[in-house]
Image: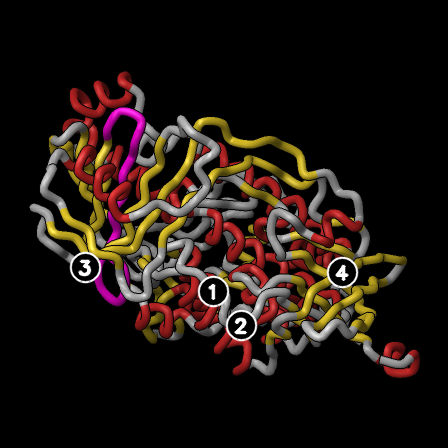
């Protein structure tokens, strides 16, 4: 590329890495009309099964990105997980959540996730530049430059307003800017996985998965779209030098030990897939350095206990896209992007802490197994314990209360600024709706309490002065609905379904919008 052409290669955002996080970010930006270049150093064909579940909150993310329905058509909704310890059934956990349009998690593998997000990206006017590697990143005041190398060795430099690294643990963005990746390897833990058909004593139900706990090994078994199961075992790591994927006999022996059935047989799926992985627990020291940002595994990395790595990346892309778009559309200055960096770091730290205490997936000790045998039936038979596990796994209660965008944090009606707005049955002008149907990823939403003593003209003037689009509704909670709305006149909801502001006066709303957004020209 000659100098003249290089000078004209100017884009809004360059996203490096076309895994689920990068694809989701590109889709979200394109929905706002932002000009995006998405590059991936691997060839199109190099997709792997890898991660295998999308939780309820992340299905809401995919809904905002316009592709939840195609995911539901391609995956298997999971209803129940059955738990066994040392060959004895301990109990079961119902995975069905409430106050969401997507009550069940979805079994779907990462190659399908990437394919479906890629299809959606094309629909919104984007594409992936495959076999294109980012080899250098430089930032400067007001923008960045990214050096790209194609498969044939030709190079070009793209100038952009923002560059986002979504390329994983060896992020070129993070390394180019010298951002430390703080943490270390997780000792004495490995995960071996195999997709296979099985002959054993447990009947097949497409909505039921299993955990089989044995000393030093937790075997998970989850149905997979296309038939058979994903077998994944978190176990101790006596021989770290063993790096090859597990063979059928290794997995069969592990399964036989954990299910206490020596006659089990495994037949790999077609196409076959097996994997052996070891892990690191790491966080980037910062998720933003000038006009460069980090997302997904480039920003944070941990053992995939609970299957939340991919899910946390999706939620981070969902958070970042609307904020970058607000800057590029002239609705906000770039300080709003800092709220992504702080919110996502706190979110990832919460997920890591919670997954470090996941008794179902971490290799059990003798004490853990004793507790599961003696207390497990009572705990899993209770109401609160399965509900707690279901809540943690679903991500529906993950919040941004600590973030700068959450104002008037005091609890009012059980909902606080920063919380995800629950989906509840409401009426608007006498017509039935679900609360989430009133929301949109492309704008903010103002919920005004029915009968609230708020001057409509004053409210209209406030919104007319603000550049960011806001739509107003007056929802009334249906009688007998399982939940409450805040006891406040005004609830301002962000594009990502989190509450930004809870207030009673229009001047408070005006001050909030003025603080974060530009005035309409």
Q: Secondary structure at mark 2?
A: loop
Q: Which residue is mark 2?
A: 44
- For the record, the magenta segment spans 214-228
Name the one closer to the observer, 416 or 371: 371
Q: Quadrant of the N terminus?
A: bottom right
Q: Magenta span has 192? A: no
Alpha carbons under labels 3 and 1: distance apart: 24 Å
- Marks 2/4 in contact by CB < 8 Å: the verdict is no
Q: Secondary structure at mark 4?
A: strand
Alpha carbons under labels 2 and 4: distance apart: 19 Å
Q: Which residue is mark 1?
A: 47
Q: Residues within 10 Å of mark 3 (few under 14, many from 20)?
A: some
Residue 216 in view (yes/no): yes
Q: Which residue is mark 4?
A: 135
Q: Which residue is mark 3?
A: 206
Which of disc 3 and disc 4 is earlier in sequence? Answer: 4
- Marks 3/2 in contact by CB < 8 Å: the verdict is no
Instruction: State the residue at coordinates (24%, 32%).
Output: 213
Q: Quadrant of the C terminus?
A: bottom right
Residue 426 image offset from top left, x and y in percent: 35, 65
- Front position among marks 3 and 2: 2
Q: Secondary structure at mark 3?
A: loop
Alpha carbons under labels 4 and 1: distance apart: 22 Å
Q: Residues within 10 Å of mark 4 (few under 14, many from 20)?
A: some
- Marks 1/2 in contact by CB < 8 Å: the verdict is yes
């Amino acid at each position: 590329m000659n100098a003249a052409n290089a000078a004209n290669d100017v884009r809004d955002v360059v996203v490096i890495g076309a895994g689920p996080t990068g694809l989701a970010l590109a889709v979200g930006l394109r929905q706002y009309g932002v000009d995006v270049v998405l590059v991936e150093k691997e060839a199109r064909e190099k997709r792997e099964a890898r991660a295998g579940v999308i939780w309820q909150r992340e299905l809401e993310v995919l809904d905002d990105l316009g592709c939840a329905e195609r995911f539901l058509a391609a995956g298997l909704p999971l209803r129940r997980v059955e738990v066994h310890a040392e060959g004895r059934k301990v109990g079961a956990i119902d995975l069905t959540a409430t106050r969401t349009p997507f009550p069940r998690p979805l079994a779907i593998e990462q190659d399908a996730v990437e394919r479906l997000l890629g299809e959606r990206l094309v629909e919104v006017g984007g594409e992936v530049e495959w076999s294109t590697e980012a080899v250098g990143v430089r930032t400067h005041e007001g923008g960045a430059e990214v050096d790209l190398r194609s498969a044939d060795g030709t190079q070009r430099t793209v100038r952009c307003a923002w560059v986002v690294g979504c390329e994983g643990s060896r992020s070129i963005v993070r390394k180019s800017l010298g951002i430390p990746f703080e943490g270390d390897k997780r000792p004495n833990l490995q995960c071996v996985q195999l997709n296979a058909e099985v002959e054993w004593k447990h009947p097949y139900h497409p909505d039921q998965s299993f955990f089989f706990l044995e000393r030093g090994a937790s075997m998970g078994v989850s149905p997979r779209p296309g038939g058979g199961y994903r077998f994944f075992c978190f176990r101790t790591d006596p021989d770290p030098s063993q790096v090859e994927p597990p063979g059928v006999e290794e997995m069969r022996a592990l399964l036989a030990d954990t299910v206490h059935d020596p006659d089990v047989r495994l037949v790999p799926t077609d196409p076959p897939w097996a994997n052996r992985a070891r892990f690191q627990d790491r966080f980037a020291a910062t998720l933003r350095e000038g006009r460069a940002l980090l997302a997904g595994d480039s920003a944070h990395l941990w053992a995939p206990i609970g299957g939340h790595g991919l899910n946390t990346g999706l939620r981070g892309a969902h958070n970042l896209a609307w904020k970058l778009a607000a800057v590029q559309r002239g609705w906000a200055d770039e300080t709003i992007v800092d709220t992504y960096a702080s919110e996502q770091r706190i979110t990832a730290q919460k997920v890591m802490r919670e997954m470090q205490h996941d008794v179902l997936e971490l290799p059990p000790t003798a004490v853990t197994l004793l507790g599961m045998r003696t207390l497990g039936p009572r705990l899993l038979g209770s109401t609160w314990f399965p509900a707690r596990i279901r809540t943690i796994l679903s991500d529906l209660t993950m919040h941004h209360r600590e973030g700068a965008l959450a104002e008037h944090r005091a609890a009012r009606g059980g909902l606080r600024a920063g919380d995800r707005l629950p989906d509840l049955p409401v009426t608007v002008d006498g017509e039935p709706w679900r609360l989430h149907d009133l929301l949109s990823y492309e704008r903010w939403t103002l919920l005004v309490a029915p009968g609230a003593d708020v001057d409509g003209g004053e409210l209209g003037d406030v919104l007319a002065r603000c550049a960011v689009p806001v739509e107003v509704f007056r929802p009334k909670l249906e009688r007998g609905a399982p939940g409450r709305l805040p006891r406040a006149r005004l609830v301002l909801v962000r594009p990502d379904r989190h509450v930004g502001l809870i207030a009673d006066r229009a001047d408070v709303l005006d001050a909030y919008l003025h603080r974060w957004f530009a005035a309409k020209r």
